[in-house]
Amino acid sequence: MPLGFSKEDTLDLFVLILLIVMYLGIILLPSKKAWISMGASIVLILGGAVTPAHAFGSLVNWNILLIYLGSLILAELFIYSRVPAFIAQRIVERSPSIGIAITIILFLTGLLSAFVENVATVLVIAPIMIELAKRGKRNLAPLMIGLAVMANLQGTATLVGDPPSMLFANFAGYSFNDFFFKSGKPSIFFAIQIGAIVGALYFYFYFRKTDSDIKVLPPEGIVAWFPSVLLLSMIGGLALFSALSAQGGIHPASGIFVFVLALVGLAWLVLEKKEKEEAKNLIIHLDWMTLVFLIGIFIVVGALAESSLLNQLAEQLAQWVKGDIFLGFALIVAISVLISGFVDNVPYIAAMLPVANALANAMQIQPDLLMFGLLIGSCLGGNLTPFGASANIVAVGLSEKHGCKVSFWRWIKLAGPFTIITTIAASAFVWLVWA
C-alpha cells in the first residue's frame, strides 16, 4: 500500500486509473469497445475493487438490459413489416415537392427514432432517401447526413430511444412516463421536440430549393401489421408500468414485459410467417456487442460512483462556477457537446451523471437541470462529427456506397450548425422550465 494512502484511497486510485485506461482504449480502438469495457470490469473484480456478486447482482441493471434487448428485437420486426417504408412512401406521394417531402420524412424519422434504435431507423428510411435523391437529381450526402442527425436527436427523447437515456433513467430513477412529465413539469421529451422542430426548419430552408415534382415511387407492400401492434404494446405497457410504479423510476417488471413481447414477436415470425431463417438471422445480427459494452460500463462506472472521487470532482467544479447556476448548466452542456462529438457518449454520460448530481447537491439545486443538460449535450453532441455516433458512420457508408463522398468538413458544414441550434433550443427549454 502506498505511503500515506488508506486502503479506500488505494482502491479509489485503482478504479480511476482503470477508468482512464478503459476510456483511452475506447477512443483508440472503438471497434473493440465492448471487449475493452468488459475487460476493465473483470480487472476491477480481480483487483478486489468489487466482488463478482456485487458487480453482477447490484451494479449491472438487468432490467435496463432486458428493455434494451427486447426493444432491439421489436425494432427489427417493425422494419421487417415494411410499415415504416410504407408510411414514408405515402408522405412522399402526398407532398408538393421533393424538398418538402424530405423535410417531413426527416422529422418523422426522428419521431420513429424515439422508440426504435437509431441505426435501425437510418437503415429502414435510407432506401426512400436514395430514391428521392435519384428522382430529384440531388446529391445523396446531405439527405443521409440529415437522416442520421435527426435520428440521433430524437434518440434522447424517451426511455427506449438510446442507451444513454436508459443509463440516465437508471441513475436518476426516471420511469418511462417521467421522460414526458416529471413533478408536474414537461420533461426531456418536450425539450427534444423543441430541438427537433428547430432542426426540421433548418433542413426545410436547406432543402426548399429542391422544388421539382415527385415521380411515383415503386410501391412498398406491407408484410404484416402485427409488429406495429407489438411496438405500440411496448410503449403502452411501459407507460402503464410507470403509472403503477409505487417507488418511481423504472418498474422492476418492465424489462421482462418488453422481452416477453419480443419473444412473442419471434414466435410469430417462425410459426405464423414461416420465416425460421429470417428469425435466426435477426437474432444473429442483433447488436450483442452493445449489450456486452453496457455490462462492462455498468460495473466500471458503478464502482467509480461508489468511490469518493466523483464527489471531489463535483466540489471542485462547484468552487469554479462559484454558485452561478447558469454557468454550471452551460458548462456541462458545452463540454458534453465537444467531448461526445469525438468519443462514445455512453461511458462519458455514465461517468458524468454522478458528477452532475453531486454538483447540483453542492450548489443546493435540484439535479434534474444539470442532468438534463448532460443528456442533451452528450447525445446531441454526437451529431457534430461523422464518427460521433454509430448512425453517422452507417449514413456515411451508405452515401459513399452510392458514389457520394462525405468528408469530415462536408459533414461539419451541414451538421455543425444543426448541432449548435438544436442544442441551444433544447437547452433553452430545459433552462426556462427547470431552472
Image (tube, helix red, strand yellow):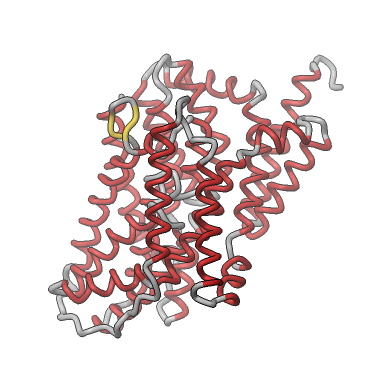
Picture layout, residue 428 above or below residue 360? below
Direction front: furthest residue: 271
Spot occupied by residue 65 in the image (x, y as percentages of width and height): 58, 46
Spot occupied by residue 62 in the image (x, y as percentages of width and height): 62, 42
How many numbered discs sit on the rendered protein?
0
Position of residue 49 in the picture relative to residue 113 (left or right): right
Of residues 419 and 39, the one drawn nearer to the viewer in this rendering: 39
Position of residue 43 in the picture relative to residue 68 (left or right): right
Spot occupied by residue 290 in the image (x, y as percentages of width and height): 60, 54
Say which quadrant the N terminus sits in. Answer: top right
Residue at the spot x=41%, y=71% of the render?
81
Residue at the spot x=45%, y=76% of the render?
400
Residue at the spot x=64%, y=50% of the render?
293
Say which quadrant the C terminus sits in. Answer: top left
Picture layout, residue 269 above or below residue 247? below
Of residues 210 and 190, the one drawn nearer to the viewer in this rendering: 190
Of residues 169 and 406, the one drawn nearer to the viewer in this rendering: 169
Position of residue 125 in the picture relative to residue 302 (left or right): left
Residue 11 picture quarter: top right
Spot occupied by residue 385 in the image (x, y as percentages of width and height): 45, 57
Position of residue 93 in the picture relative to residue 32 (left or right): left
Picture layout, residue 386 above or below residue 239? below
Direction right: furthest residue: 1
Residue 190 picture quarter: top left
